Image: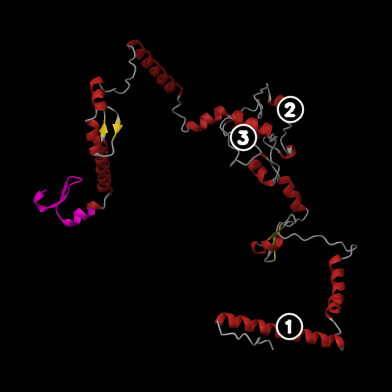
Amino acid sequence: LDPSTGFTCVTCQLIFETPELQRDHYKTDWHRYNLKRQALQKEEDELSSLYCFTCRKKMKSRNALKDHLASKKHKEMETKGPKGPRQPRKKNSEQLVQSHERIADIEIQSIETSDPDDDDDDSSSSWVTAIPITSCLFCPQAKSNKEEIAEHMKFHHGFSLPDKKRLVDEDGMLNYLGLKVGAGHCCIYCPDIRSRFATTAACQAHMRDKQHCKINREPEGMLEFAEYYDYSPMCDSDYESGVSDSFIDDGWSLTLPSGAKIGHRLLMMYYRQYLRPKDSNKPDVGRTALEKARGLYPALAWTSTTGTIAKQAARDIKFMERYRRRFDLRVGLKSNKLFKSQGRNGDN
């Protein structure tokens, strides 16, 4: 391109035919990257220009660096010679040959052990680290068959598979538990979200210490092992007995076939309130006190002030009103700084 057009980018060292191409170039990531790299290069140059490699000190300004170079201490360091960076120890030729041979042996072993037909190396390694069905899930104990290890786990750890009458794949469930503890490092009782540990030993120690050597038998926990159980006979018997699986929905609550009721979220404030049970035989203390107060307070409020007592109360009220007016007058005179006669008191 002709550099005489004037449309250039100094940072990227490019020449453009039209100003539109130049403006589009300024918006690209390539141009921004070159700008950042140029700014970093300038900072490094400034830092290197303010650094004394002989004394290994960084100065704040060029004047400080100039004064430092003229100092006596810097000149002494120059005569002694700068301390260079630590050099790595040189290995003998024999050690280098041995290290290269070791690396070659490791590479050959890895190539021989790798299986080209295996598409997922992580899954294979996980199956290798899984606990077999002849080993205990909670300790390093191992037996010759699964019956002996089941007896060991039941006697020492109190573990047994729930609902064995409906269990159709016992080996599959034991393999799954071994994979969960050995490869996944997860507790069989805690949820998977918070029961992940670094090693199998740490997971087993957690289950022994927390007494989690058991399976969560709640419906949410048993859903994990649904494929190893068969509950179809129970469903068939319920169907034959005429149990309806339909839900009863009245708009604000939903009645499940089991009899449980689920309320609407808008009524949560009413479901959460706690009402104390009321005993019909025990008298209501609060209501009794209220009935007494209904007759007591009107009696206290009524006063038959007639005759002499009423006249005395009127005189007292009149005296207090007159005393208040006098006090207000005195305050007004003092605040306005009016002339006050010495011969007249003004108390009427």
User: x and y percent of residue 237 in the render?
Assistant: 76, 49
- Image position of 251 with respect to 199: above or below: below
User: x and y percent of residue 79 in the render?
Assistant: 23, 21
Type of amino acid under label 2: His
Q: Nearer the viewer, residue 228 or 39?
A: 39
In magenta segment, residue 14: yes
User: x and y percent of residue 201 in the render?
Assistant: 61, 28
Query: Residue at point 25% right, 37% down?
Result: 64
Q: Which residue is mark 2?
A: 156
Q: Based on the displayed image, in which of its 4 quarters is residue 185 positioned?
A: top right
Please say if the residues under marks 1 and 2 sit with CB atoms less than 8 Å apart: no
Which mark is first along the chain, 3 or 1?
3
Q: Nearer the viewer, residue 144 or 39?
A: 39
**Residue situated furthest right in the rendering:** 281
- Image position of 186 with respect to 99: above or below: below
Q: Which residue is mark 3?
A: 176
Q: Based on the displayed image, in which of its 4 quarters is residue 231 positioned?
A: top right
User: x and y percent of residue 223 in the render?
Assistant: 65, 44
- Dot 1, crowdedness within 10 Å: few (<14), some or many (≥20)? few
Q: Is residue 317 left or right of residue 282?
A: left
- Image position of 293 with respect to 124: above or below: below
Q: Which residue is mark 1?
A: 320
Secondary structure beneath dot 1 equals: helix
Inter-mark Cα distance, 3 to 2: 21 Å
Type of amino acid under label 3: Tyr
